Structures are given as structure tokens and as C-alpha cells.
Amino acid sequence: MALLDGKKLAKSIRKDVREGAQDFAKRWGRPPTLDVVIVGEDPASQIYVRNKERACLKAGLISHTHRLSADLSQSDLIELVRNLNIDEAVDGVIVQLPLPEHIDPDVVIRAIGPIKDVDGFHPINLGHLFAGRPGLIPCTPLACMRLLDMAEVDLKGKNAVVVGRSMTVGKPMAMMLLERHATVTVCHSRTEKLAHVVAEADVVIAAVGQAELIKGEWIKRGAVVIDVGINRLEDGALVGDVEFDTASARASWITPVPGGVGPMTVACLISNTLEAAKKRVA
Ligand code: GUN
């Protein structure tokens, strides 16, 4: 078994982004710029947003964070997003999820200009992805794909099983794997005989958000396992969606939790921001 080191790959992506950002700044008089909008006090979101700010700083990108009160109206949030869309000095816009109950996240995501949608959540960008055309790709599945590429996993004709069907991870991941000629199965919490489906997989992408749902003994010998899950157990320990110790005894490559997909996701966000900036001035 070999570990897919997300921290190491994220560092190398940050270095590439830093160089790209310097070139951009030389040419256009300012570094690429990401605006992050956060509404309310969700503690996990506060940590994620801080990580995004830190990643921008490290890579030489400008970041602005708009910290707004939980009672902000949906129309005021949309007005802010529209102002960011037309601000020439802003390249990427993300609205941190989840939003308070009274705000419909779909409406807010659709208000983000697709060329600045560095989360890749706008239906236009998802549509490009589903059609196999270039566009901004959601950061977490992009992170998984970059980890598979680091391990030089040949996906062509292989059985890839995605566990989880979210709009942000499972569905776009399935499309990306299809684009690379894998045979893709998408499973979820209601899938019958999940163990049997996973046992056929050459590549497993676990993104269900349930601690150690996928047992090590289900993993085919030599399979590649990418674990998107970050779950906190009662004793405070962080675990993925896959039982790591038993799975790592069978897998050829596996991502640790933490230190696998997590650090890569933010690296992909700043990489998307640089790409969006370059495309806007092209
Ligand atoms: N909340 C949890 N993950 C994400 C993400 O990738 N983007 C946004 N906007 N919100 C999130």
C-alpha cells in the first residue's frame, strides 16, 4: 500500500499557483483575486473560510472575505453577489455553504457569474462538465482527480465506484471519471448490497459523509481508494468514510484522513481562481 499524500501535492499546486499569480500580476498590475462571502456563524464554515484566506495569502492571491450577519436577507445577499460579478478587480466569487434557513442556496449559486464561479457549482459550469466541455470544475472532485493522476492511475476501462451522489462531489466526480473512460457506478445510502458493488471496484471514491461506512474487507486487492469523508467520532478522532487500517492492507493506493483530499480541495480552489482570472483577461 502507498499513501496518496494530499498535503504534498497541495504544496506543489500552491507553488504552481504562486508562479502563475506572479506572472498574472506582472502582466495585469494586480494578483488574481478571490472574494469569499460567509453568512452567519457556522463554526465549521468559519474554519473553512479561514483556510481559504490562508491558502490565498500563501499563493500570492488577494482574498476579500465578506462576513455577514445571519439575518441578512436573500435579496441583499444577491445584490452583493451581483456587485462582485461586475467588479473588474474580482476574479473568483464563492458563497460559503450552508446558508441560513431563510436563504435558498440554489438561487444564490445561480446569481454568481459563471466565469467567476470558482466553486464550479453554477448549473452552467455543471452543464459544461456533464457535456464534457471545459469550464470551472468543483474543487473536491477536481482534488480527487489530481490525486488519481499523481498516482498515475489508468482509469480507462476500469470499474470506478462513487459512493455518494451530491451535486458538489458524487455527481461531478462520476462525470469526470466517465470522461476519462472509466466504467462508473454511483452508489448512495439506499444502494442494496453496497459491499458487493464496492468489491468490484478498481477505484473507490467515498463521499457519503458516514464514518467508516465502507469496510476494509470490501476493498478489492490492489484497488485505489480516495476518501472524501471527514467525520468526527465521539472521542474527537477524525475518520473518513472508509475503515482506513483494514482498507490500507488491501489497497494499492489510499488517501489518509486527515491529509488526503482535505488539503487538496483548497489548493484546487486557488488553482480555479488563477484559471478564472486568466480566462477573464484572455
Ligand atoms: N461548504 C462546504 N464545502 C464548501 C465548498 O466547497 N464551497 C462552498 N461554497 N461552501 C462549502
Image (cartoon, rainbow, N blue to C red):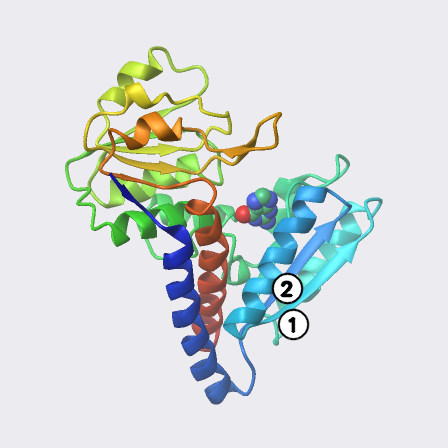
Q: Foreground residue, 48 or 217? A: 217
Is any part of residue 91 visible from this angle?
A: no
Q: Mark number for residue 239? A: none
Residue 56 figure quarter:
bottom right
Q: Residues within 10 Å of mark 2 (few under 14, many from 20)?
A: many
Residue 105 figure quarter:
top right
What is the spatial separation of the Cα atoms under label 2 and label 1, in whole angstroms? 11 Å
Q: Mark number for residue 87? A: 1
Tell me the residue at 36%/41% (across/down): 255
Label 2 residue SS: strand
Residue 70 left/right relative to 191: right
Above/below status of 84 relative to 70: below
Marks 2,1: beta carbons within 8 A = yes
Q: Position of residue 135 (x, y in %)?
A: 40, 57
Is any part of residue 133 visible from this angle?
A: yes
Which part of the image, by quadrant, shows the N terminus?
A: top left
Above/below status of 111 relative to 35: above
Tell me the residue at 14%/36% (across/down): 157
Label 1 residue SS: loop
Q: Position of residue 12 (x, y in %)?
A: 37, 65
Name the residue carrying label 2.
35
Foreground label between 2 and 1 = 2
